Image (cartoon, rainbow, N blue to C red):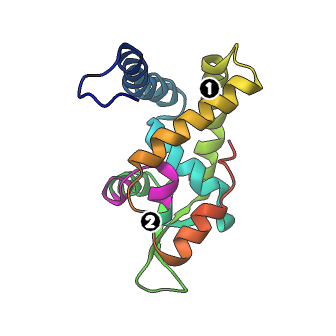
Amino acid sequence: MADTDTLLPEEQHAWSTITGLLTTLPAVLDAALGRAANLTYFEYTALAALAAAEGRTLSMSTLAHRTHGSLSRVSHVIRRLEAQGLVRRETSLTDRRVTEAALTPTGLDRVRVAAPVHDRHVRQLLEGLDVSDLTVLDRLGGHVLQRLAPARPEGRDARRAEEATPLAS
């Protein structure tokens, strides 16, 4: 856009919209998922990623990638979920240096309670947008995410993360 340090009015308006979404959306989803399943949105996202994964297990680095969280944040969340019996940590059978998170049956039950609430809220928020709008929203969000993305996990986890299908709710 412009070669000046001052944002153009269009840039400022778009940025204000993005920061409004970033501030408001997590609180709304946290409240809804908290009431329905005693989960934060980030906890739900982690559990849903595990539910969608082959064997309902992911390495911690792949889970961090899929949730757009740092390894440290994911580790803290998994520790809390483990204390509730929703996940368990395991050492990878193929690489003893890798810690994996595995969804427990209790965790899967919790995801099944939370998923309809999540999906209902997402549909309400996206109501009125057609397929073309959703495609543009996806493209624009992906552009910003790419610019923010931390370094991708290395090796096998990066390939698995790239081949992953969208979260099944």
Q: Front-most of 25 and 114?
A: 25
Task: Identify which residue is drawn at 63% across, 54% down.
Answer: 51
What secondary structure prevails in the magenta region? helix
Lower position in the chain sequence, tag 1 or tag 2: 2
Q: Amino acid at mark 1?
A: Val
Q: Secondary structure at mark 1?
A: helix
Q: Amino acid at mark 2?
A: Ser
Tag 2, which secondary structure? helix
Labels 1 and 2 touching (C-beta < 8 A): no
**Residue 122: assigned label:** 1
For residue 26, which numbered disc appears in the image?
A: none
On the picture, is 130 further left or further right than 80?
Answer: right
- In the displayed structure, would residue 88 be above or below residue 44? below
**Is 130 drawn above or below residue 3 in the view shown?**
above
Q: Mark 2 — residue?
A: 61
One can see residue 11 in this view: yes
**Is 67 colored magenta in this rendering?**
yes
Task: Give the magenta-colored segment's residue range.
Answer: 63-75
Task: Report the Cα–Cα distance between label 1 and label 2.
Answer: 26 Å
Across and down, in percent, residue 95 comes to: 49, 86
* Image position, residue 114 (x, y; %): 59, 35
Q: Position of residue 149 (x, y in %)?
A: 42, 51
Q: Quadrant of the C terminus?
A: top right
Relative to 38, is 14 above or below? above
Q: Quadrant of the N terminus?
A: top left
The residue at 51%/24% (across/down) is: 32
Residue 107 among those drawn in magenta? no
Residue 45: image x %, image y %?
52, 44
Within-10-Å neighbours for mark 2: few <14, some 14–19, many 20+: many
Residue with the most extreme left position:
5
Q: Residue furthest front?
A: 3
